[in-house]
Each structure stands twice: as structure tokens, then as C-alpha cells.
Amino acid sequence: MRESSSPEEEHSVEDAIYNQIRDAIGGQKLPPGTRLREDEMRQIFSVSRSRIRKVFSRLAYDGLVVIEPNRGASVARPSVKDARDLFEARRGIEATIVTAVTRKFGAAEKRALRQHIEKERRADEERNHADMISLSGDFHVLLANFADNGLLSKFLGELITRESLVIQAYERPGKPSCSFHEHEDILDAIEAKDTPKAIALMSEHLSNIEDRLDLDRDEQRKISLARVFEG
């Protein structure tokens, strides 16, 4: 990635780097606590020190990165309270989303969500953990998009990205954090226009994700930054 000259090009380059790092965090490729060494990162993306610092600042503003004096940037490590707060926020936002979607649910929404759950089913059968994680989050994003409320979609997207850090920090080995069967039950209630049931199932679903976490767990993997961002 080359340095750009105009302000528009500079902003575009920073956006691209920001999005790659954010996607790596959301895709669970960068575990909590991973050091984002400034020199290594600027070499990976072929940009200046000041530009990579701007990107780190944006990620820190989003709560995805922590910047410490004399240590630099690292992927945020959520506390147990952070995890509890996140799921509480999601329950409130997703209840509003489910209400809006149920009210305007039609054939197009049904088809898109059924097709998506089928992808989740195939990923589960193939034990494709990476696809299971990605598709699970995408189900909730799809619902938010169908609610047709930009702010709700934005807030939920931010929470889902932060949730990836919580899951990496606290997920119990061998226990997937999300179940497509629960998504099917939620969709059945939405299709039946049963808003209270759909909200209750969504709340139960999020509580189940939370319950599958081991909030006493504290371990960290070593990560190769160059391998994460290769290509």
C-alpha cells in the first residue's frame, strides 16, 4: 500500500488500513492483548508512522484498541464487566430490532434469512469454525438491516465487533458461542408475527451465548501480524 499525496487519497488509505484491522479483530484473527507493534504495522501496510498512529487512534476511539504510554497499541482486552455490559446492551438493541422486523416482515426478508441460516447449517456440519463465527454475526446484522434503521445497524455492528474480543477472551474450548438452531427459532417467531415470543427468544439466545463463556478464563495466543495481513 503506497503513500498518497492528496487529502482524499490519504483518508482513503487510512480507511482501508482501519477496515482491515477492524475486520481482523471482528473475524477473531487478532486476540485480545495482541501487540500491534508500530514499526511492524507500518511496514506491513507501507505507510508512515504518523498514518498508522492515526489508524490506531480511530480504533482506540471505537474501543477495539488500547494505547498505553511506553508500550504502544494493543488489541483491547475486555473485562468481565465489559462482557456483561455488552450483552445487556445487545439485548436492548436487538429487542428493538426484532420488533421492527416483525412489523414489516415479508417474503423477501424470509427468503434471505432462511438462505442465510442454511449457510450456517452447512458451516456447522462441516465444522468450519471461522465461517460459523462470521455467519453467526451476519445473521444479526441482516436482521438489523431489515429493521431499516441506520443507527441501530451501526450500534449493533460495533457491539458485534466488540463481542468478538469477548468471545476470544472467554469462550470455552469446544463450545461454539452461537447456535443456528436458536436463529431458526427466532425466525419462526418473527414469521408468525409473534413479537413477544421473538423478543424472548432473542434475549434467551444472547443469554445462552453469554452462559457459554468462561468468564474466569485468561489466556493469550501469540500472533504473527504479518501472517494476519498478508496479501
Image: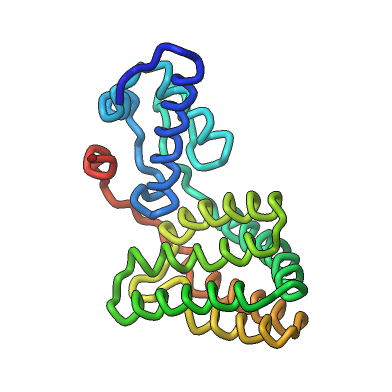
209 relative to 78, above or below: below
Residue occupying the point 47% across, 73% down: 116
Q: In the depicted view, which residue is nearer to us: 7 or 156?
A: 7
Residue occupying the point 75% across, 65% down: 96
Q: Is residue 207 visible?
A: no
Q: How many marks are shown on the rendered structure? A: 0
108 relative to 61, above or below: below
Query: Picture coordinates of residue 52 (x, y %)?
Result: 40, 24
Q: Which quarter of the image is occupied by the N terminus?
A: top left
Say which quarter of the image contains residue 148: bottom right
Residue occupying the point 54% across, 57% down: 160
101 relative to 223, above or below: below
Q: Is residue 174 left or right of residue 187?
A: left
Q: Which quarter of the image is occupied by the C terminus?
A: top left
Query: Picture coordinates of residue 50 (x, y %)?
Result: 42, 16
Q: In the depicted view, which residue is nearer to us: 229 or 145?
A: 145
Query: Picture coordinates of residue 170 (x, y %)?
Result: 44, 62
Q: Residue furthest front?
A: 107
Q: Is residue 12 left or right of residue 194?
A: left
Residue occupying the point 31% across, 21% down: 2
Q: Which colour style is shown?
A: rainbow
Query: Picture coordinates of residue 207 (x, y %)?
Result: 60, 74
Q: Is residue 57 visible?
A: yes
